[in-house]
Image: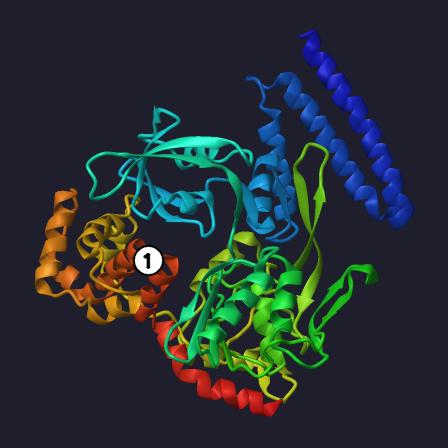
């Protein structure tokens, strides 16, 4: 009891000191406007004291206070956020562009750690780990039923340390043993780059990390060496990242000195203009940018700048509409505060951020319920503010980047297929493992595989029987209705197992209606170049 009272007394004393300092500091800046805040902080202090002294059960203050931080910031806007120490480490890793470990993309399938792909240039690739390998032991201990968290905790570690793996490889009776020395592992933001056809390059960017601009430049040079004369950049479901990297990517395609994005904040110190530098390495390359409702923040900066400067054709769906400038403060306990300090605007003056006045729940609900049909979207245009690109084309504000050419995602699948696709055991990957073993050595490259692999009724029956053996209820009619799509799913998994992740995406794009429609729009992309 005495210990509890000492804690309460200390909290109260510290609270009075901090509230007094805060009140004095704020009053000096904003006068009497802080009276309400000061009163509420005193009330909060009283509540904490009463809970600590009287609540029936012991109180987990760390969780409760974390919840209070989240709740406070959620009332400001949907993107201001408190980040716990544990969350911060994971988030930072994604955007710094590297971590230390063995370097595999993996999943836990049928209770075993399964290698989806070794990271290019990683220790795992160097020792010869392959897609489909199942890690059955780590340092002499079984890895059966490891969780994702256990896998990462066990396989990651300081650079220079080693880990011993026992691996069951498909087609081999005896397990293989590997000793892998951990190293710096790059986290690539360009997930794939390849030639879709003899003249069209394709670059898939899934985030804007500290290495994105360099990765894009490397991809551009490799694609040009293969004969690329036009480029499709896929920013779908790219949730953003570093502003500086987005600006550097746009800068590669612009050879004029012009605004790429500007920010306005509470004070002039937050107002910034980011300019192109006339150093573009590919100013005459016809470009199409593919976006959807999952394209946010830095992705929208790229799309908005290229659209306003008439430098690239934007296709797909209206983007997310996240245009808040956020600054991150490191807090004393290792956590962080990410706070909105300004707003992003495209070169024409369009605010990227859409409205959030109805609260966070409605904000996200609107994202997933807004119409994608082009005719419905056309009826909305009259209600939106108009802006002009540098060449005088009309573009629309209202939040997000509206594409020049609307291409809704139109994949319609039966409930049976959706259920099978969402199975956490990755059923089609497991089936593809068997097929890949049968096809090993048959095809010289992924192109010859794509030209030849067209499974028919016999293969459909084989897949149905296999799924039933896995305990799945499978009817033939929906399987037949979705067969073209399912063939693409299995074929892409086979390609990833036989070659690499680039081969996986190349096959998958064959059934991607947005990509296939975008490929027909390069005439318009060339017309934009003529306007400049």
Q: Can the viewer see residue 399?
A: no
Q: Quadrant of residue 50?
A: top right
Relative image position of residue 262 (x, y in whole percent): 71, 69
Q: Residue drawn at (73%, 34%), measured in percent from left and top?
A: 332
Q: Nearer the viewer, residue 84 or 144?
A: 144
Q: Nearer the viewer, residue 384 or 345?
A: 345
- Secondary structure, mark 1, is loop
Q: Residue pushed farthest top? A: 2
Q: Residue drawn at (68%, 28%), measured in percent from left and top?
A: 47
* Lateral position of residue 82 relative to residue 219, left or right: right
Q: Can the viewer see residue 162?
A: yes
* Lateral position of residue 38 relative to residue 31, left or right: left
Q: Residue drawn at (31%, 44%), measured in percent from left and top?
A: 424
* Quadrant in the picture for the N terminus: top right
Relative image position of residue 158 (x, y in whole percent): 55, 34
Q: Which residue is mark 1?
A: 499
């Amino acid at each position: 009891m005495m210990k509890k009272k000492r804690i309460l007394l200390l909290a109260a004393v510290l609270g009075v000191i901090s509230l007094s300092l805060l009140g004095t500091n704020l009053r000096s800046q904003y006068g009497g406007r802080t009276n309400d805040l000061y009163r509420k902080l005193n009330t909060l202090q009283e509540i904490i004291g009463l809970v600590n002294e009287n609540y029936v059960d012991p109180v987990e203050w760390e969780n409760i206070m974390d919840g209070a931080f989240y709740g406070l910031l959620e009332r400001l806007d949907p993107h201001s956020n408190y980040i716990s120490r544990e969350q911060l480490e994971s988030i930072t890793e994604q955007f710094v562009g590297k971590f230390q470990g063995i370097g595999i993309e993996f999943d836990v399938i049928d209770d075993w750690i399964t290698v989806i792909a070794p990271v290019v240039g990683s220790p795992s690739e160097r020792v010869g780990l392959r897609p489909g390998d199942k890690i059955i032991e780590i340092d002499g201990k079984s890895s059966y039923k490891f969780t994702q968290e256990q896998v990462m905790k066990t396989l990651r570690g300081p650079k220079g340390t080693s880990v011993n793996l026992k691996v069951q490889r498909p087609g081999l009776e005896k397990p293989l043993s590997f000793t892998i020395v951990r190293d710096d592992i790059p986290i690539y933001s360009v997930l794939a780059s390849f030639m879709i056809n003899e003249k069209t390059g394709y670059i898939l960017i899934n985030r804007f990390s500290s290495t994105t601009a360099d990765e894009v430049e490397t991809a551009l040079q490799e694609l040009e060496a293969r004969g690329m004369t036009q480029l499709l950049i896929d920013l779908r479901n790219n949730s953003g990242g570093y502003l500086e990297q987005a600006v550097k990517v746009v800068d590669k395609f612009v050879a004029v000195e012009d605004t790429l994005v500007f920010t306005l904040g509470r004070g002039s110190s937050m107002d910034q203009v980011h300019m192109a530098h006339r150093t573009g390495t590919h100013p005459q390359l016809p470009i199409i940018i593919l976006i959807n409702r999952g394209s946010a923040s830095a992705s929208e900066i790229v799309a908005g700048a290229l659209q306003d400067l008439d430098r690239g054709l934007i296709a797909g769906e209206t983007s997310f509409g996240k245009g808040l400038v956020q600054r991150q403060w490191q807090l004393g306990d290792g956590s962080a505060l990410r706070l909105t300090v300004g707003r992003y605007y495209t070169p024409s003056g369009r605010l990227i951020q859409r409205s959030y006045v109805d609260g966070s729940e409605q904000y996200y609900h609107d994202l997933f319920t807004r119409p994608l049909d082009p005719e419905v979207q056309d009826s909305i245009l009259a209600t939106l503010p108009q802006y002009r690109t540098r060449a005088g084309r009309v573009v629309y504000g209202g939040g997000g980047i509206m594409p020049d050419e609307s291409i809704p995602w139109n994949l319609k699948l039966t409930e049976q297929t959706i259920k099978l696709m969402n199975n956490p055991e990755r059923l089609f990957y497991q089936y593809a493992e068997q097929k890949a073993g049968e096809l090993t050595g048959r095809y010289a490259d992924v192109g010859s595989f794509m030209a030849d692999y067209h499974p028919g009724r016999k293969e459909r029956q084989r897949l149905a029987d296999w799924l039933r053996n896995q305990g799945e209820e499978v009817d033939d009619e929906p399987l037949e209705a979705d067969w073209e799509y399912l063939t693409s799913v299995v074929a892409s998994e086979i390609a990833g197992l036989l070659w690499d992740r680039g081969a996986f995406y190349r096959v998958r794009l064959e059934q991607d209606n947005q990509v296939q429609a975008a490929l027909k729009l390069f005439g318009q992309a060339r017309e934009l170049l003529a306007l400049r």
